[in-house]
Amino acid sequence: MSSLVPTEPGARFNIPRATYRLQFNHQFTFNDASQIVPYLARLGISHVYASPILKARPGSMHGYDVVDHSQLNPELGTREDFDRLVQKLHEHGLGLIVDIVPNHLGVMGNDNVWWLDVLENGPAARYAYHFDIDWRPNRSSMRDRILVPILGDAYGMVLERGELQIEFDAAAGSFSVRYYDHRLPIDPREYPRVFSQPIPEELLPPDDAHRADFESLLNSFSNLPPRDDTSADAVAVRHRDKEAHKRRLARLIERGPEVLRHINESVTRINGTPGQTESFDALDALLEAQAYRLSYWRVAVDEINYRRFFDVNDLAALRMNERSVFDATHHLIFDLIDAGSIDGLRIDHSDGLYDPEEYFLRLQERFGGGPERRPLYVVTEKILAAHERLPESWRVHGTTGYDYAALQTTWLVCGDEETRMTRRYRTFTENEASFEAIAYESKRLVMRSSLAAEVEVLATQLDRIAHLNRHTSDFTRAALREAIREVIACFPVYRTYISARGLGEEDQRIIHWATGLARRRSAGAEVSVFDFLRDVLLGTAADLRLSSHSQAMLEFAMKFQQVTAPVTAKGVEDTAFYRFNRLICLNEVGGDPSRFGVSSTALHQANLERARLWPHSMLATSTHDTKRSEDVRARIAVLSELPDLWKQHLSRWSQLNRNKRRQVDDAPAPDREDEYLLYQTLAGLWSPELPTEQLIERLQAYMTKAGREAKRSTSWINPNADYEAAVNDFIAQLLSNPERNAFLRDFTSFVGTIAFFGRINSLVTTVLKITSPGVPDFYQGTELPAFTLVDPDNRAPVDFEAASARLDSLASVSEVHALFEESHGAQAKLYVTAKLLQFRAADAALFALGSYQPLQVEGEKKDHVFAFARAHEGRTCVVIVPRWSARLMAGEMRLPIGEIWADTRVLLGNADAGELHDVLTSQPARATAEDGSLRLADVLSALPLAVLKAS
């Protein structure tokens, strides 16, 4: 890794040149990754970028459901396997960046020690305050208890069917309730409840020592400190004594098998008999005495009292602001960094953290950093709105690249055709709503459904604050709850970053904007409640004489921030993005579907700003979270350049397929919105090499997921089997019997044009990602064309053996132009990727530290060219790519090369470095003596893009 640039002078950590994301799971292990290291090195990658590697839920395909931060995931391999991977990486000059998950832990099941401790001991658990649990919810019966929404039916039904069973672990001396794969410990203080009858004398006589020991043990269990005594001494005594009592019980039953027989008989009795309702009374009473309340999973919508990752019940949020939690969750990762095994971190879902800035500072302080230093390479998964900027006070090196992916795709879209594309969409779907309106309603929807409990927690906090002041005590809980919903629905970003350090100007602006808009939307209501909520968030509603009042408001504001982010994610990304389908390449994580194209000036400005503020931020184009891969988006963007062609074929398809639709609930299935989505998706995914059955299965799975996310005709909570079956049948009929299928004949004639220019878009995207300011990131397999949809479609295994063979074959290529003429484009994309990554490896400083200079373009086709230069210490690189090639070529499937560029030229200005050579073709290029410009008809005579370096 000697060709790398350090994160700061004298630091032992380096800036990656290029990262390669690998998705680890039981099907792709540390040993599997070791096998592909030589290929990645030849490709030009500097760092493997690993999905989470800590112990996750068994069978996890993604690793984000970590259950133990102190262990590597055994399904990925042993510590020795991991060490061999690191050694192999180092032998080939590569490093390792690891994705970590500080926001939450996988819970339920039977494999999270911290969670099991909380279930057993409630607020008196040693780990009770590791999790973000509201131990004082509004419902009095839930005080000091936690809701566990794991049941598949109503509690009473599940209980009386005998699905909840008490089990005794003789080796551990402990009792638990078992529900399928879930184990929930019984509070040891409540063990005596299991025994409704004493030991029969015929089993053990009254004077038997084992009988006396057992009865003494039950008494000891019942005298443990209660769960509501959370003093440090009581918690310590409870933990010490309960474990000692369990060990005594385990030893007792080894000596006295009659005791075990009595326990087993008591367990059988308390477990009840289906059909005999009263036989479950004792078990019901025992469960009611626990620190948890078992419930139907749907109850979580309204009453869950622990913060989750979004609305996922088995991912419980951690209180990462507590130092003890931070230390416990990062111990192994820090040890691996200290050992030189890990070289950087990707932080998942930082917007879920109580105080992200403090968290990042702690990370850097561990490795010698501080307020002005950031030695460890760290990037954060942060979704930025188009108008939003990453806080400069964060001790990170940038984002994971969603902002870049969204911007790059939006730039591909032809904004000149927005009116016509919008008209076609509205005519077909009869959807007149703006994206902003759909996003607003979608956020309101998720706050009434899957995230209603989170809003309720906030309403409880705000109600308590309101009652601290006689001027606000008349606000009803309902009014406060509605104000919270309305303001969150109007929030223009994922969250603010209010903290004990104060309130920034941008956060103030956001709060004023959201509360002001909510106020205007609520004409006729009591609008002063919005002023109160605004003042609480700003911290100006406090009676300054009461520090407790100010603290309550700060705590509310910081909790409020942790709710706006999941509401936006679930409401916008996972709902509105599936309800507004004007041009679906824009419906991407970090994107804004209402932003139909951006100018080249805007892209230059973003690159300049990144070069100045975040020169080492990741540049992603596909990730494990993207709705569509970069190649699918590159194709769909072409539709915006050819609106007449799109309109012509769309009208024809609608007629050809009208008899394939069914009526479900007096409405067509698929509905017009889903049909419009389907045609775009098919255009993005289509490949003549893809077997028909596989294409049908993938589209059916995708459209089922898309329909449920949209929550119109079906949903995850209430699946509409008839509607989903009708859509699946529609897809099957669309694609079956190709020899007699009029739709397929018309579609394939259309998609050939879209695919051709989509390949050019994809190559442009690759060139810009590798040469723009930032660190280019490649999601596994995307160095080749990858036509995938949202997970799990994008998690399919990659054929690395075939990719390696392709890369080897490119070493002997003499006719580069021929690669760009291939119909599938695989060789061209891999060639461009490898050539440019190797160029970047040869001069890491040019790209890590080099300046960025937009280059002026003049001539007839200037709107179709994007050009810039990178320069560092006298070394220069000039990048020239085409834009809107389909429009430029009027839909004719020819590469935009040679005289098509007419008089168009790029002015080099200060970037004129004499004779240049194209990295891709090795051909020379020299600026004209008159004005120092490059004539594109010459520079782009063989290929439609160029990356020129000084000789």
Image: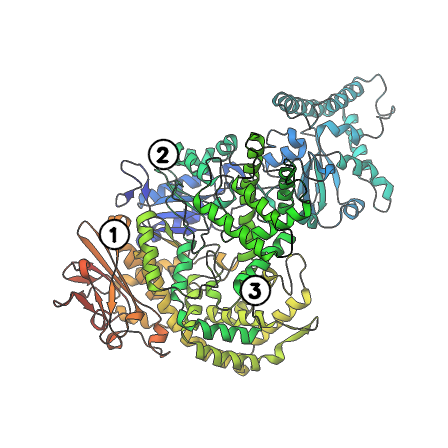
Regarding mark 2 in the picture, which secondary structure is present there? loop
Q: CA distance from mark 3 to mark 1?
A: 41 Å
Q: CB atoms at circles 1 and 2 under 8 Å apart?
A: no
- Is 917 or 604 nearer to us in this picture? 604
- Which quarter of the rendered picture does the N terminus lie within? top left
Which residue is disc 2 drawn over? 369
The tag earlier along the polypeptide, 1 or 2, is 2
Which image quadrant is residue 467 in? top right
- Is 383 or 878 nearer to us in this picture? 383
Regarding mark 3 in the picture, which secondary structure is present there? loop
- The amino acid at mark 2 is Gly
Residue 851's label in the rendered image is 1
Q: Which residue corresponds to the image point at 37% horizontal and 67% vertical from the top-left?
A: 761
- The amino acid at mark 1 is Ser
- Is 432 or 233 nearer to us in this picture? 432
> Most extreme residue toward the front, as rendered?
471
- The amino acid at mark 3 is Arg
Please give left or right for residue 418 compared with residue 129 in the image.
Answer: left
Please give left or right for residue 703 compared with residue 924 in the image.
Answer: right
Above-or-below relation of 641 to 137: below
- The picture places residue 813, in percent across and down from the top left corner, at 26, 66
Which residue is disc 3 drawn over? 579
Q: Which residue corresponds to the image point at 57% horizontal and 48% vertical from the top-left?
A: 310
Q: CA distance from mark 2 to mark 3?
A: 45 Å
Q: How many marks?
A: 3
